[in-house]
Image: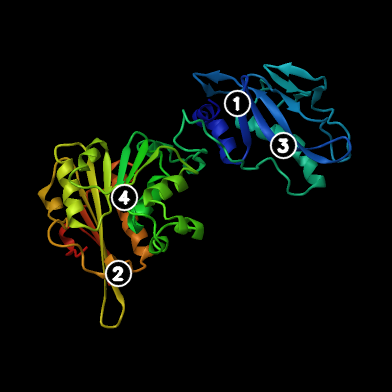
Amino acid sequence: MSSSLIARSPDLLQLRNEGFHLEIQGGYVLVHDVPYVTPDRNVERGTLAFRLDLVADVAVKPLEHTAYFIGKCPCDAQGHPLSAIINNSTSAVVNGITVHHYLSAKPRTADHLYRSYYEKVTKYVAQLEGHAQHITPGVNARTFPVIETDAAESVFVYEDTASTRAHIGVPTSRLKTQRIAIVGLGGTGAYVLDMVAKTPVATIHLWDGDVLQQHNAFRYPGAVSLETLRAAPPKVNYLATSYAAMRRHIVPHAEMITADNAHALRDFDYVFSCVDKAEARRSILNALEGSTATLVDVGMGVRLNAAQELLGQCRVTVVDSRRDPAAIATLPLAGEDDQNLYATNIQVADLNALNAFMAVEKWKKRSGFYASRSSGPMMVYSTSNSLMATSEEAPCHA
């Protein structure tokens, strides 16, 4: 309730984005960690409490100018009580909240009311914080606390303050209901997970039957510990556990996708295929026929030239429910597995990350997150000329 009410109220959201430690309790907004001066001239932190005036669960213009303070008697830098704003210093319990001082700081407006909670909170904070800064320069109430979430309200363990600070809540919300599958958790698949995990999609399922090995660590985001490598967990279990630190609803499946189990992918909105075997790719493509799932398939080709320099290509192809033959034609579906240096686990983490970015960008464009002009079902990047080509603009060997 606290996080959702703050998110719906522009004034409160602005305060939180600026680093104030807010809590909603008993019909009040509490502002914690406000620095103030005590009677013995120490700088401590207390809490301001403001009654919340709501319309349809959104904070509106405050209908009173007063506030409560929880802490010792707030003073100036000399230790003298702030008698200009302290109306009463008798402890009381208000809506289940124990308060110690009743403050009154009228604004110079015709109705003696603040225009917004943002204005009211920042004015009261300044009254206390300013005296504290005479003793401890730089101390302030903008502490940027970690904001935990309720499992019933969010897929994240802690609040996604990045989206709110950037004011991109609307495009971000378009991803919320999506069910995502990632097949193949090698270097590219792991980077796809890294990006998708930081969006509010409803659920992420991971498929890969391999265990985590040493060469994988050099193509994965983050750093794999020596102890983890020695334990040799399934890749999907390692990744699900790692990302559980920040989000919920990541489901590992420690098995390869084959023709026998690929039908499980039909229930997803988007399936990221990060496999290097043509047989697995064919199984996924065939299983999704007739479903509403959209396939986002990635591929990479890396080779050495005569000068012992790497030549690389990254490809992403999108096949939606319309089953565009032009899109399907770009998929490597026939023949043996790629015979290139990438198949021998050469370390190309940068190309893994780039290939994953290309796939995630395609997904976000189709989901309405990014503005987009239609660019065809395929996109290819080549390291030799640093060009990004779409559809039939360039040949693809990935």
Q: Nearer the viewer, mark 1 or mark 4?
A: 4
Mark 3 or mark 4, earlier in chain: 3
**Under tag 3, what secondary structure?**
strand
Indicate the position of residue 266 as horizontal and vertical percent values: 22, 38
Mark 3 or mark 1, earlier in chain: 1
Mark 1 or mark 4, earlier in chain: 1
**Which residue lies under the disc numbered 4?**
208
**Would residue 310 be seen by someone viewing this image from the given angle?**
yes
Mark 3 or mark 2, earlier in chain: 3
**Which residue lies under the disc numbered 1?**
24
Q: CA distance from mark 2 to mark 4?
A: 28 Å
Q: CA distance from mark 3 to mark 4?
A: 49 Å
Q: Nearer the viewer, mark 3 or mark 4?
A: 4
Mark 2 or mark 4, earlier in chain: 4
**Under tag 2, what secondary structure?**
loop
Q: Are marks 3 and 1 in contact (CB under 8 Å)?
A: no
Q: Please name the residue shown 30% across and 69% down the image.
A: 383
For the residue marked with disc 2, what is the amino acid?
A: Thr
For the residue marked with disc 3, what is the amino acid?
A: Val
Image position of 158 (left or right of 275): right
**Which residue lies under the disc numbered 3?**
34
Q: Tag 4: Cα neighbours inside 10 Å, few (<14), some, or many (≥20)? A: many
Q: Please name the residue shown 82% across and 46% down the image.
A: 135
Indicate the position of residue 187 as horizontal and vertical percent values: 35, 58
Q: Tag 2: Cα neighbours inside 10 Å, few (<14), some, or many (≥20)? A: some
Q: Please name the residue shown 14% across and 51% down the image.
A: 328
Q: CA distance from mark 2 to mark 1?
A: 52 Å
Q: Nearer the viewer, mark 3 or mark 2?
A: 2
Q: Residue pushed farthest left?
A: 325
**350 vs 175, nearest the viewer:** 350
